[in-house]
Image (cartoon, rainbow, N blue to C red):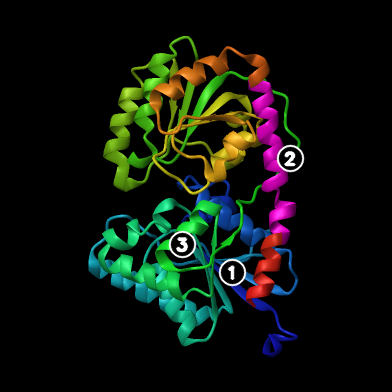
Amino acid sequence: MEEKVGKKIKVCFFSPASYPFFDTDSKAAYGGAELQMFLLAKVLSLNSDSEICFLIGNYKVKDVKNKYNIKLISSINLKQKESIFLKIFKSLKYFFCLTRLTPDLLISTNANAVAGISAFYCKVFKKKFIYRTSSLIDVNQEYTKNNGLSGKLYQYGLRKATKVITQNKEHQFLLKKNYNIDAVVLKNIFEVKEPENTNKEFILWVSRYHKLKRPDLFLKLAEHFTEKNFVMICPYNDSNKVDWQKLKEEANKISNLKFIEKIPFREIQEYFNKAKLFINTSDFEGFPNTFLQAAQGKTPVVSLNVNPDNFITEYNCGIFAEGNLEKLLSETEKLLQNKADLKIKGDNLFRYLQENHDIKIVGKQFKQFIESVL
């Protein structure tokens, strides 16, 4: 730290798909990990001792600062299916982008080869690297075992990171078990507001399309509860367009289900506010930001497989079906018939949000963590 006295610390975030949070008119797809990176950068931007830059995808924007005083820099886009030559080219482009920016601290998320390149840059130039996990595949060795060279680079980055932060205690345990890494738990951050009093109109599902999200199960719910209204918001990436189109065609056959391709982030909270229940059918997650958006709307969560740190059960804020679809259907039916319990669970979920994820609390923890790293 002594060599940096009197000068600002350069902090660089790498999250290509976070761009829509900076440009609310953008129609690009986004996810929960990208939202978290945006909010963490926003928290640090309030620190006068830091100079924040954010590497976004190749959206052809000029390298300029925005209203958050964060410099946006076009870099590379990450796609699921690319040739080895394109991957090598992008890796080199990313590395030389870092050498041009010379950040003191680099932060990235999502399992991919970028973690390894980031760690290598920081090792060569004696900088700091923080990796943030975002899903179960980041910590259970699935990515490292099934992705060849990219998996090896990811594992290198994970093990060579200055620090690793993760979303819940279960993932902290898996990082220690599988990689012998002592990770720090930093819960997802959320800008909590006073809840709105709105009419509850439908049952909601929101996620970017992926087979692991099991959107087909939400269609089964809509077919089961024919007297209830359902809304599905499901954007897609180009690599999933064919399967997404099939899902859309099936969804449009269900009369009580409204299928929406995408909603701008600035408008999507209204859907959570109006939902009676929020449904999660994923095989696994990290900690879904949609749970927090549901909490902001006092909308109980119904989850098939995902219950980070057992919070749904502990706070009595929804239904955890323990992977059993029949249990999900039966417990959901009971809850929908009990307005008093719906309100209790919604209130409990909002209380959980306030106590565990408020930006005022987690933002302070993040700043203290950054200080300890530097």
Q: In the rendered structure, are the residues bearing label 3 and label 2 in contact, judged by CB atoms less than 8 Å apart? A: no
Disc 3 versus disc 1: nearer the observer: 3
Please name the amino acid that badge 2 sits on: Lys
Label 1 secondary element: strand
- On-image quarter of the N terminus: bottom right
Q: Position of residue 73 (x, y in %)?
A: 52, 67
As drawn, is 152 to the left or to the right of 356?
left
Q: Which residues are magenta?
A: 342-364
Residue 365, horizontal then vertical, whole percent: 70, 61
Task: Give coordinates of residue 101: x percent, y percent.
Answer: 53, 78
Q: Amino acid at mark 1?
A: Cys
- The residue wearing badge 1 is 53
Give the labeled residue for mark 2. Answer: 193
Quarter of the view holding residue 235: top left
Gap in angstroms between the C-alphas marked 3 and 2: 33 Å
The secondary structure that most of the magenta stretch takes on is: helix
Q: Is residue 139 visible?
A: yes
Residue at position x 62%, y 61% from top? 41
**Most foreground residue, 158 or 238:** 158
Of marks 1 and 2, which one's residue comes earlier in the chain? 1
Q: Is residue 107 left or right of residue 354?
A: left
The residue where tag 3 is placed is: 175
Say which of marks 1 and 2 sits in front. 2
Q: Nearer the viewer, residue 332 or 182?
A: 182
Marks 1 and 2 sit apart, C-alpha to C-alpha, by 27 Å
Name the image quarter holding residue 304: top left
Residue lying at 58% horizontally and 35% vertically, measured from the top left: 312
Image quadrant in which the C terminus is located: bottom right
Query: Would residue 362 be counted in the magenta stretch?
Result: yes
Residue 262, placed above or below residue 127: above
